[in-house]
C-alpha cells in the first residue's frame, strides 16, 4: 500500500490527479479519469454514489486507503475520492493494489 500511495503522490506532483467530490465527479463524467480511488472510510452515500458512477461511465475504481491518507498524499485535508488522469499512473497503481 505504501508504494501505491507514493505513486499517487508522484502522480499528484505531475498534475495527473483530481481530488475531492466535485472534481472527481467532473473528471469521471467527462471521460478524463482512468482510475477512481475511493477512501475505505468515507460515508456510505459517497461510496454508493461514486462506485455506481464509475460503473456507469466504465471507469475502474478501487476502495483504497483512508480519507486521511488520500489527503496526505494528494495535498490538503482529508479526501474521500481521487481520480487519476494518466493511463500509466493508473495501471501502475492498479498493479500495486
Image (tube, rainbow, N blue to C red):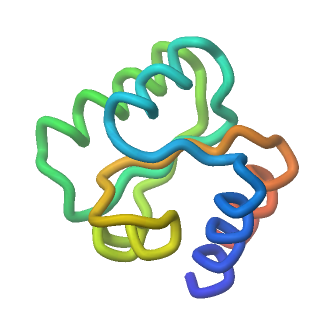
Tell me residue 63's x, y (percent): 41, 56
- Give the residue at x 87% y 50%: 88
- Give the residue at x 80% y 62%: 92
Residue situated furthest right in the rendering: 88
Q: Quadrant of the N terminus?
A: bottom right
- Give the residue at x 82% y 42%: 87
Tell me residue 70's x, y (percent): 42, 66
Give the answer, above or below, for where 97 lies relative to 15: below
Compared across the picture, whether 50 is left or right of 61 comes to left
Tell me residue 69's x, y (percent): 39, 76
Residue situated furthest left in the rendering: 44
Give the answer, above or below, for where 71 lies relative to 5: above
Compared across the picture, whether 74 is left or right of 7 comes to left
- Give the residue at x 68% y 83%: 3
Residues 77 and 24: in front is 77
Residues 41 and 67: in front is 67
Amino acid at each position: 500500500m505504501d508504494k501505491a500511495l507514493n505513486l499517487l503522490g508522484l502522480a499528484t506532483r505531475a498534475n495527473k490527479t483530481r481530488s475531492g467530490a466535485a472534481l472527481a465527479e467532473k473528471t469521471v463524467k467527462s471521460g478524463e479519469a482512468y482510475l477512481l480511488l475511493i477512501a475505505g472510510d468515507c460515508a456510505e452515500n459517497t461510496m454508493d454514489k461514486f462506485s455506481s458512477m464509475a460503473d456507469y461511465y466504465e471507469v475502474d475504481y478501487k476502495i483504497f486507503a483512508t480519507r486521511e491518507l488520500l489527503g496526505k498524499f494528494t495535498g490538503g485535508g482529508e479526501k474521500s475520492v481521487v481520480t487519476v488522469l494518466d493511463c500509466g499512473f493508473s495501471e501502475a497503481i492498479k498493479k500495486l493494489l
